[in-house]
Image (cartoon, grey):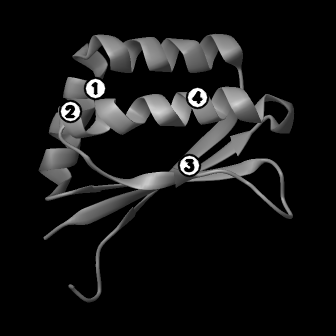
Amino acid sequence: MSITVFIRYQIDPFKRDEFESYARRWLDIIPRCGGELIGYWLPDEGTNNIAFGLISFASLAAYESYRKDLRTDDAGRANFEMAQQGKFIVSEKRTFLAPVTAN
């Protein structure tokens, strides 16, 4: 059974470009650490401070292994540190989703 992690970010709308750089760095890091990146989305019209990310895994155990690998990955750690220093992420909420139907 697979799971998808739905990440809802509240971002500083005046630091949108910094968040976009942060999200683009994950394009290589996430697959290398074991996640299947579905994508990141930035606000375009309407609400200007909410962004989303979706990452799928074969199981919750695979997600836990990914989290461990992510913390030991040099580029992953650097991206986390850049986010902390840049303070462009105000808050982050994760929801774990299971598919109802399969493709």
Residue 53 in sight: no
Label 1 CA crowd tier, 10 Å (few <14, some 14–19, many 20+): many
* Amino acid beneath label 1: Leu
Name the residue that disc number 1 marks: 70
User: Horizontal and vertical percent for residue 4?
Assistant: 33, 62
**Camera-side mark, 3 or 4:** 4
Name the residue that disc number 3 marks: 93
Name the residue that disc number 2 marks: 33
Q: What secondary structure is found at the residue carrying circle 4?
A: helix
| Cβ atoms under marks 2 and 1 closer than 8 Å | yes
* Amino acid beneath label 3: Lys
Q: What secondary structure is found at the residue carrying circle 2?
A: helix
Horizontally, residue 83 falls left or right of residue 86, namely left
In this view of the protein, which residue sits in the foreground, 68 or 48? 48
Q: How many dots with numbers?
A: 4
Q: What secondary structure is found at the residue carrying circle 3?
A: strand
- In the rendered structure, which disc, 1 or 4, sits on the residue that comes first in sequence? 4
- In the rendered structure, which disc, 3 or 1, sits on the residue that comes first in sequence? 1
In this view of the protein, which residue sits in the foreground, 20 or 58? 20
The quadrant where residue 83 appears: top right
Measure the C-alpha gap from mark 4 to mark 2: 19 Å
Residue drawn at x 43%, y 11% is 78
Name the residue that disc number 4 marks: 21
* Amino acid beneath label 2: Cys
Measure the C-alpha gap from mark 2 to mark 1: 6 Å
Horizontally, residue 85 falls left or right of residue 78, namely right
**Camera-side mark, 3 or 1:** 1
- In the rendered structure, which disc, 3 or 4, sits on the residue that comes first in sequence? 4
